[in-house]
Each structure stands twice: as C-alpha cells, then as structure tokens.
Image: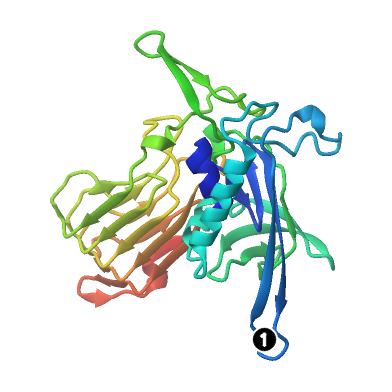
C-alpha cells in the first residue's frame, strides 16, 4: 500500500495489486516486494524486519529478456519520468512509516487487488491447481475455491490469473486497464477525442467503454426517508466508499436500492468496490428490495466487490429482499425479514449467486 499511495501522490498513477505483493500498471508488473523477518526465540515476538522493494520507473520493453517482455513493465517506459528515483523512494518510505505499527489498510488493499473474481492457477510448491479466487479475508489471505467446491485460505504461494476468452469490458464489465487523459477535443455533439498519457492497452476492442474514475464520488446517506417513489429509491454505482445507514424506505415501486453497471444501455457508471448498507428499514418495497445485478452479457468474473448488508429490517411485499449477481466478497448478515407479519428465514429472502 505504501508504494501504491506514493505513486498515486507523486505520479497520479493508479496501481493494482496481484496478491500477495506484486503491483501492476496497465496489465504489466512494475513492482515486486520481498520481506525477511526474525523473531526473538524466547518471547516469540518479531525482532527485526527487512523489506525489499523493486519498482521499475523508466525501463523500456527492449531492456527485458524475451521471456519477460510481455509481462514486465514500468511506470514510464523509456522515460522520462516526472519524478526522480530518490524523491519517489523517500515518499515510499514515508508512506510505509505512516502505516506502522497498525497497518490498518486491509480495505484499501482489497479495493486495489484485482485477483478476486478470476480463475487462477495456484502454485504452492507442493502442488499446482486451478481455482476460482473468491475474496481477501480479514487476515489478508486469498480465499480460493477448488473444483468440487472446497475452499482454501492461502497464506502464501504464487497465483497467476488464467486468460479469459475475450478480456472485453463491454461484455464482461470487468476493468482491464487504466490510463490518464492529457487532452480532450470535442469533434461534434456526440463524439469527443481523448489524448492519453500512455499507450492504449493491446487488448482494447470495439464497443469497449471508458469510465472517468477521477469524478466518481464517495457517498454517505443517513437518516433519510424515501416514500411512495414509483421507481427505485437510490441508484448507487461508484467505486469509492458508499455508506447507506439508518434510512427508511416505504413502498418504492422498484428496488429501494439498486446497483447496476452496463456498457450497452444507459452507460451510467462502472464498478462498486466498497459499499455498506446498514441499519435501514424497508417497508413493502419492490422486488428485489436491494438488487445488485450488473448487466454483463458474458460474465467472466465478479464485476462488483466488497459489499456488506447488515442489521437491516425488511417488511416484504414480495418474496426476495436481497438479490446479488456477479459480485465478490459479499456479507449479508444480522438482517431480519417478515412478510404478512410472519418471520421469514434468510435462505428464502436472500438470493446471492
């Protein structure tokens, strides 16, 4: 996290994390991190820790051996870089020290990690197998599901994402690259021309879409009443943190809270990475009361991630309170459901798959 924060602050670039400690930019590995530690033999406590960080700043493709040319990269291939190595190293050190000793950054790590939702190849040293990466647990372990449904929490090992069939976001709605806009020109009423700071990704396809993530908002809605609205109550889709708490929804004609994502109709926004819906009351709202269903024509992984629905009360008009599709790291817990004055078990009111 220290490297990602420093690069964002000084370079304006967003780095993704491949569990457990590799950082990627535009689909290529630009940073690797190794650690070594020693413990006190008497008390078992950590005695010393060495962190080695290798960050590629201006390395060009010609600098890599053939076996690495397609996977390794740098922040500014061929240079020049707008920041010196010394300044960037100092910023990384400061960010690392600011994280000590609590290292309270797991939510941010989850938001940057692009592995959950993909099929991966896991190599532990003892065996190699294919699995579906599900989520990062509270201990920082990658939870995967092997064929047959057995889940394993990985503490270490090499994980590589298996290639998908298309890699086309207009069909899967899964982001696959990032860039920075350096210029904008309006060609006519419907078309604009963007000038990008870095080369386009090689796998871009016709009809793929671009989302302006700089202007996506953080959202906090509390103590609000939505009553007798013929459509939905809240339509929420942003990758920044969202908190909806202590609100009251009465007789909305459609879902009280709707989370979508599409690249073929309204083009309203992209993925959700951190949403909490807590301690709200829903009375006789449309089905499903909370609906999180991205419109992905050919889903190949999780579109949304890290959604918590907890402590809510549902008085149902129809049968389904929560419906979720193509979403990873979902927690729906401590909610209560009634219909016609009778309590309904969670398995009949919640549909997550």
Mark 1 neighbour density, 10 Å: few (under 14) some (14–19) many (20 or more):
few
Q: Position of residue 199 (x, y in %)?
A: 62, 24
Question: From the viewer's perspective, is residue 27 above or below residue 82?
Answer: below
**Residue matched to label 1:** 44
Which of the pair 47/19 is nearer the observer? 47
Residue sticking out furthest to the top: 188
Which of the pair 287/173 is nearer the observer? 173
- Identify the residue at image location x=86%, y=35%: 65
| Quadrant showing the N terminus | bottom right
Q: Is residue 234 visible?
A: yes
- Identify the residue at image location x=43%, y=55%: 324
Element carrying mark 1: loop
- Identify the residue at image location x=44%, y=66%: 331
Please identify the quarter of the rendering in which residue 185 is found.
Answer: top left
Residue sticking out furthest to the bottom: 42
Question: From the viewer's perspective, is residue 78 above or below residue 64?
Answer: above
Question: From the viewer's perspective, is residue 132 above or below residue 59?
Answer: below
Q: Is residue 23 left or right of residue 91?
A: right
Q: Position of residue 170 (x, y in %)?
A: 53, 32
Q: Is residue 53 left or right of residue 127?
A: left
Which of the pair 59/196 is nearer the observer? 59
Q: Is residue 113 visible?
A: no
Q: Position of residue 236 (x, y in %)?
A: 32, 46
Q: Position of residue 131 (x, y in %)?
A: 70, 59
- Identify the residue at image location x=49%, y=70%: 102
């Amino acid at each position: 996290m220290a490297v990602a924060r420093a690069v964002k602050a000084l370079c304006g670039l967003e780095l993704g994390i491949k569990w457990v400690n590799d950082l990627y930019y535009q689909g290529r590995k630009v940073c690797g991190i190794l650690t070594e530690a020693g413990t006190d033999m008497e008390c078992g406590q950590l005695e010393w820790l060495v962190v080695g960080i290798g960050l590629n700043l201006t390395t060009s493709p010609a600098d890599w051996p053939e076996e690495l040319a397609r996977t390794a990269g740098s922040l500014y291939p061929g240079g020049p870089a707008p920041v010196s190595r010394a300044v960037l190293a100092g910023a990384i050190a400061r960010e690392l020290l600011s994280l000590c000793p609590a290292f309270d950054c797991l939510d941010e790590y989850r938001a940057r990690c692009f592995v959950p939702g993909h099929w991966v190849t896991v190599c532990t040293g003892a065996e190699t197998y294919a699995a579906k990466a599900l989520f990062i647990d509270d201990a920082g372990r990658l939870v995967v599901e092997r064929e047959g449904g057995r889940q394993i929490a990985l503490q270490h090992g090499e994980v590589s994402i298996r290639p998908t069939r298309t890699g086309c976001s207009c069909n899967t709605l899964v982001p696959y690259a990032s860039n920075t806009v350096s210029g904008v020109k309006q060609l006519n009423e419907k078309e604009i021309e963007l000038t990008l700071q870095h080369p386009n990704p090689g796998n871009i396809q016709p009809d793929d879409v671009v989302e302006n993530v700089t202007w996506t908002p953080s959202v906090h809605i509390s103590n609000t009443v939505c009553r007798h609205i013929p459509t939905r109550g809240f339509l929420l889709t942003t990758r920044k943190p969202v908190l909806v708490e202590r609100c009251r929804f009465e007789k909305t004609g459609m879902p009280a809270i709707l989370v979508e994502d599409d690249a073929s109709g309204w083009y309203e926004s992209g993925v959700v990475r951190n949403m909490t819906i807590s301690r709200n009351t829903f009375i006789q709202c449309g089905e499903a009361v909370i609906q999180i269903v991205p419109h992905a024509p050919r889903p190949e992984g999780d579109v949304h991630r890290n959604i918590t629905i907890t402590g809510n009360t549902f008085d149902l008009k129809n049968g389904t309170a929560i419906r979720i599709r193509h979403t990873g790291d979902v927690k729906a817990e401590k909610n209560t459901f009634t219909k016609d004055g009778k309590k309904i078990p969670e398995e009949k009111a919640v549909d997550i798959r």
